[in-house]
Image (tube, rainbow, N blue to C red):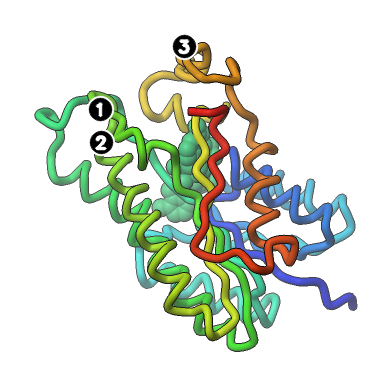
């Protein structure tokens, strides 16, 4: 059996995570596909990955839950026996509103799904990266814009991801683990529907210098660059994939 590198992608049943799974498969990575609810879509992604001649395994788990994360990595150990790259991609967006209308349940859900998850998955990955590795966090340009009157909880969660990226990169550099992040903006995925406005990218795309929305594959390309040896002297860094936003 070929000894391909192994990537674990959280939230890879659709959107940016799914595109990233297929992108890594093209470069001969075996892919561990995490999802929370959409098993049918996760299995479809696995079929696409396998059609490219590499291994794909689907592992369910709520990455905001510590027990699920520990169990997910135990399954990864059993299935693949190693991890070379972790992509902290899973994330959620709640319906648009101002801070005055947000309750603690919503805020905590966004923070645990978007932030606690990345801490927990990174911890488990780093334990297994004794000879080096690479972590790419999927942040957002919202960390810089703040998303006023829409989702400042989401924007703040991505601000935390940016700080995690900077701090963790310094913490694990001597171990040979690089930690970087992409900051997408206005990408065509179902996340905007879940945030209450399916057509949000088309409504706002004219405000972007490049004048269009982005595609998941364009984010996947930046994630791959940061994960791969092509960026071997880069850590604690960010690539904005947001049309100039
Ligand atoms: P998406 O299409 O809504 O997909 C979200 C993925 O995350 C799904 O696979 C979902 O799994 C998974 N997920 C959600 N909660 C989870 C949990 N608790 N545990 C495990 N998996 C979970 O979103 P997307 O647009 O591809 O977003 C991917 C990342 O890019 C997110 O971090 C997002 O914040 C970031 N981003 C997106 C945009 C954009 O414009 N789309 C812009 C900036 C940043 P299920 O399908 O099983 O629910």
Ligand 1 closer than 8 Å to the CB at disc 3? no
Q: Quadrant of residue 99?
A: top left
x then y, percent, for residue 61: 47, 61
Q: Secondary structure at mark 3?
A: helix
* Relative to 75, residue 42 above or below: above
Q: Are marks 1 and 2 in contact (CB under 8 Å)?
A: yes
x then y, percent, for residue 124: 47, 77
Residue at 89% across, 58% down? 53
* Relative to 23, residue 103 above or below: above
Residue at 43% across, 38% down? 141
Viewer-proximal residue among 94 and 228 = 228
Residue at 63% across, 81% down? 132
Q: Secondary structure at mark 2?
A: helix
Which quadrant, please, contains the N terminus? bottom right
Which comes before the other along the chain, label 2 or label 3?
A: 2
Can you identify the residue that label 1 sits on?
A: 148
What's the mark number on residue 203?
Answer: 3
Q: Is residue 36 visible?
A: no
Q: Is residue 141 visible?
A: yes
Measure the C-alpha gap from mark 1 to mark 2. Answer: 6 Å
What's the mark number on residue 231?
Answer: none
């Amino acid at each position: 059996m070929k000894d391909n590198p192994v990537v674990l992608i959280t939230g890879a049943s659709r959107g940016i995570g799914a595109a990233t799974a297929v992108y890594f498969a093209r470069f001969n990575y075996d892919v561990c596909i995490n999802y929370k609810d959409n098993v049918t879509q996760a299995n479809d992604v696995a079929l696409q990955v396998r059609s490219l001649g590499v291994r794909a395994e689907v592992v369910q788990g709520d990455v905001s839950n510590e027990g699920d994360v520990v169990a997910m990595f135990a399954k990864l150990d059993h299935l693949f026996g190693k991890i070379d790259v972790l992509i902290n991609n899973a994330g959620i967006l709640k319906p648009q509103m101002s801070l005055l209308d947000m309750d603690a349940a919503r805020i905590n859900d966004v923070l645990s799904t978007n932030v606690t998850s990345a801490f927990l998955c990174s911890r488990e990955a780093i334990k297994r990266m004794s000879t080096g590795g690479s972590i790419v966090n999927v942040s957002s340009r919202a960390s810089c814009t703040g998303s006023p009157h829409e989702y400042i909880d989401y924007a703040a969660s991505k601000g935390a991801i940016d700080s995690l990226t900077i701090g963790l990169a310094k913490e694990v550099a001597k171990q040979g683990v690089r930690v970087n992040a992409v900051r997408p903006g206005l990408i065509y995925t179902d996340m905007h529907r879940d945030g209450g406005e399916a057509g949000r990218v088309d409504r706002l795309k004219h405000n972007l210098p490049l004048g269009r929305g982005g595609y998941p594959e364009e984010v996947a390309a930046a994630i791959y660059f940061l994960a791969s040896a092509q960026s071997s002297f880069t850590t604690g860094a960010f690539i904005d994939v947001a049309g100039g936003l």
